[in-house]
Image: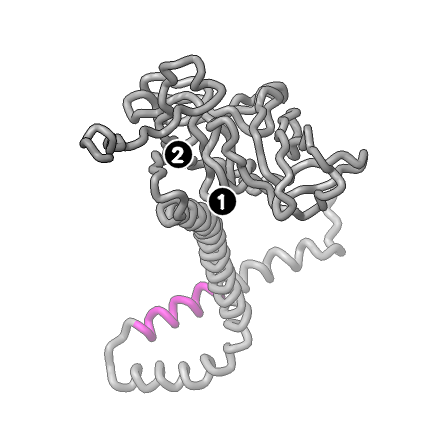
Amino acid sequence: MPRDRTGPDPFTRPLRRILVAGLVLLLLAVFLIWRIESVRMEQLRTALTDRFVPSMSWAMAPVTRVADMIDNAQSYVRIYEQNQELRRELQQMRAWKEAALQLEQQNARLLDLNQVRLDPQLTHVTGMVLADSGSPFRQSVLLNVGQRDGIRDGWATMDGVGLVGRIAGVGQQTSRVILLTDSNSRIPVTVLPSGQRAILSGDNTAAPALEFLDKPDLVRPGDRVVSSGDGSVLPSDLLVGEVAQSPDRRLRVRLAADYGRLEFLRVLRSHERPTPGDPGDLVTPPLPATPDIPDLMSDGAP
């Protein structure tokens, strides 16, 4: 089949060859101009550079812009990494702040335990709370002091502010404290300023009830409640809390001790109670001994 000579193909191929040959010659000439070492060629190179390079700045603008974008992206990456590092340090500082606050509160409680002045005849042993009962039916905590520290059953425990409970079970290295909120806790108390005697009965709630009041009408919400010391069960005048009235009109005691943060407790060494030798001493105390009175009649007086 004869080729169609009227199309663009017969003219495109020779033109392409001419352009390629011209480009090769141009590049060869540029190469020779830049390789020839002479004064004239150096002047020619300088003239060509001054003529064409400034006018080619528009061609370098995209390259410059891309380089700037790459630098900005690297800067953003570095800023992001620094931001993440600062976030991690901020979280660590918050944890350290919380630990510092807890240590400050713990130090304040320890200082309070060491500086509180009670009965000068009473001494105390400070113990750390190891665990609680974890049961809604038994309110007690475990201390890390026991028989090796001279702890005995029945001794009162305080948190530095108010009465917490009493020792009810002593081991060699630990002891159990039954709290005032426990249903098995019964202690004699005095309501001030009326001076009414009562029994503080725990019922597994945060506010134990006041029972066996002689004259409930003399007791008002906000009255101070302290231990009475009756029966030598606990030392007297230990702060217990203040009177509060429940919605059912029952008198209760809002305890002064912070039961939500029992970390250290002071165990009060009570006075030694003498053991009665005579059964009659259980009813009336023995009379004090009277000094001997000399018999004047035996001296021969008239």
Residue identified by numbered label 2: 268
Q: Is residue 246 magenta?
A: no
Q: Residue at x 47, y 23 (%)?
A: 284
Tell me if residue 139 comes above or below residue 22 in the rendering.
above
For marks 2 and 1, the one nearer the N-term is 1
Closer to the camera in the image, 35 or 129: 129
Res. 184 image quadrant: top right
Looking at the rendering, the stretch of residues picked out in magenta corresponds to 22-34
Task: Give the structural element (helix, strand or loop) at label 2.
Answer: strand
Q: Which mark is residue 161?
A: 1
Q: Residue at x 47, y 82 (%)?
A: 54
The answer to whether residue 114 is visible is: yes
Residue 73: image x %, image y %? 51, 60
The answer to whether residue 99 is visible is: no
Task: State the CA–CA distance, disc 2 to disc 1.
Answer: 13 Å
Query: Looking at the figure, which quarter contains the N terminus?
Result: top right
Scheme by which the image is coloured: one colour
Residue 71: image x %, image y %? 47, 64
Q: Which mark is residue 31?
A: none
